[in-house]
Amino acid sequence: MPQLAKQDRCTGCMACMNICPKGAITFVDDKEGFLQPKIDQSKCIDCNLCEKTCPEMATQFHWNEEPPAVYAGWNKLDRRISSSGGAFSSIARFVIERGGAVYGATLDDKLNCRHIEVDTVEGLGRIRGSKYIQSSIGLTFKAVKKNLQADRYVLFSGTPCQVSGLLSYLKKDYPKLITMDLVCHGVPSNTLFKKYVEKLENRLEFAENEHVTNYEFRRRDGWGESPSISTTGSNCRKIKGVNGLYMSAFDKSAIFRLSCYACHYAKPNRVGDFSVGDFWGLGHQGVPFKHDMTKGVSLLLVNTEKGRSIMKALDESNFYEQRTLEEASVRNHNLTKVSRMPNNRNEVIEAFMDDEKSLDSIEDMHHLIDKSLKARLSALSDTLGIYDLLKKIHNFIG
Ligand SMILES: Cc1cc2nc3c(=O)[nH]c(=O)nc-3n(C[C@H](O)[C@H](O)[C@H](O)COP(=O)(O)OP(=O)(O)OC[C@H]3O[C@@H](n4cnc5c(N)ncnc54)[C@H](O)[C@@H]3O)c2cc1C
Ligand code: SF4
Ligand code: SF4
Ligand code: SF4
């Protein structure tokens, strides 16, 4: 009987399901809505491939040995429509121009988050944008392998534990495989997210046939952080305060998968060829950054020789300036530290999962919204549109 990672260590990477030759592994929700592996004994032939492939059971975390080269910059074509500066698009365009396939997370109109394949520049729109939910990998790793065996370029982008799961599954390097991990704060479950959206629809007093059909976790027009929704009956609108309680709980690390609080990947030695994140600390340490930061700036870590050779081959639609790891780490805690589990994590998750509880009652019990003066000023400057002005002044004085 194979042993898979225990519930508090399983990252949900799904490498075990992809490797199983008998299709004996499926994933089911636990009580917090996180997908957990389940073995069907009647199909299992005890080959133990799943156990040997599981990064947690085999303690194979695929860290690169060298420290990364650090860049701040953007893709000029996609900066405005990306989460940070579009570093993902820089590498994705490189792959698509060479006839390759790109894998990333999409959110469908039923609000299911899962990995998909795209192979056109237009298709990238489906996977651009951060979805702060655990994406389901499904059988993506098998599809990646098929493309690599057909000698196509492949870019796989995901959380570091997903990249690690893919590398365990593939077992060897392929010259045309490019991996990109995210600087990762942690992931809530898709089921909890959907329960939150139901509560939001109730709070906003939606008609019975009106539903949220898209949830943008961040306004994609710079570094903006306010989430927004589109519904069957209306276009995009921003949500704030108690309506945005999910993002407040996310920021406070209150609703993550248990494995996230013991994450092996919150360190500068990364898993992928590239790592991407927000360059929050840019200009706050060492050399000032003398370029326009108002439209968002990516943190791009180049971790391997393969990554370095792709960086050299990027075309003129990309702008990247080399910076330091100290500067990258100064305001990006998950580059060096694991997210800390708050004492009330279990109760917060229970409250979100409880159909009887409203968003107001969850906030009353758990005080997830930051009501400090700094947070209020930041919300006010966002509302009044003076955020960009402040950033311009910051740029000017360097
Ligand atoms: C759950 C999560 C936590 C994060 N935590 C941090 C953090 O603490 N600090 C930080 O600096 N950055 C964090 N990021 C990364 C950041 O939000 C941006 O995704 C990143 O900077 C890429 O920006 P971009 O402009 O290059 O990408 P975009 O063009 O906007 O593309 C986003 C990329 O992320 C992938 N992606 C989106 N959602 C998911 C998901 N749920 N699972 C796997 N892959 C996904 C997409 O497939 C795409 O490749 C996090 C992202 C996610 C999804
Ligand atoms: S032991 Fe083999 S057959 Fe059984 S679940 Fe694991 S991979 Fe599948
Ligand atoms: S391979 Fe991934 S999903 Fe499967 S048990 Fe291990 S950590 Fe969990
Ligand atoms: S915090 Fe770690 S374990 Fe959690 S999703 Fe991110 S990489 Fe995976």
Image (cartoon, grey):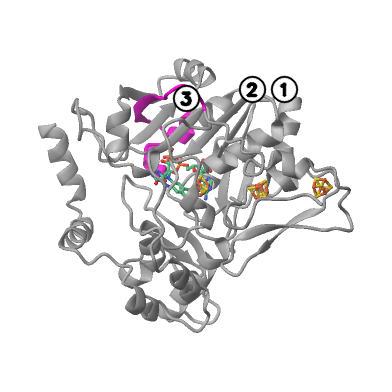
The disc placed on residue 303 is 3
Mark yes or no: residue 146 visible: yes
The residue lying furthest to the left in this view is 397
Residue type at numbered disc 2? Lys
Q: Which residues are magenta?
A: 64-90
Give residue 324's quadrant in the image: top left
Disc 1 from disc 3: Cα separation: 23 Å
The disc placed on residue 97 is none
Q: In the picture provided, is 20 more to the left or to the right than 285?
A: right
Disc 2 under 8 Å from ligand 1? The reply is no
Looking at the rendered structure, the secondary structure element under dot 1 is loop
As for residue 87 lying within the magenta part, the answer is yes
Question: Which circle, 1 or 3, is nearer the viewer?
Answer: 3
- The residue closer to the viewer here, 288 or 47, is 47
Q: Where does label 1 land, which residue? A: 151
Q: In the picture provided, is 20 more to the left or to the right than 371?
A: right
- The residue closer to the viewer here, 185 or 391, is 185
Discs 2, 1 touching: Cβ within 8 Å: yes
Residue type at numbered disc 1? Asp
Neighbour tally class for label 1: few under 14, some 14-19, many 20 plus, Cα within 10 Å: some
Q: What count of labels does the image hold?
A: 3
Q: In the picture provided, is 240 more to the left or to the right than 143?
A: left
Question: Which circle, 3 or 2, is nearer the viewer?
Answer: 3
As for residue 230 lying within the magenta part, the answer is no
Residue placed at 66% from the left, 44% from the top?
Answer: 57
Coordinates of residue 11 in the picture (x, y in percent): 58, 50
Residue type at numbered disc 3? Asn
Give residue 153's quadrant in the image: top right
Residue placed at 53% from the left, 67% from the top?
Answer: 192
The disc placed on residue 176 is 2
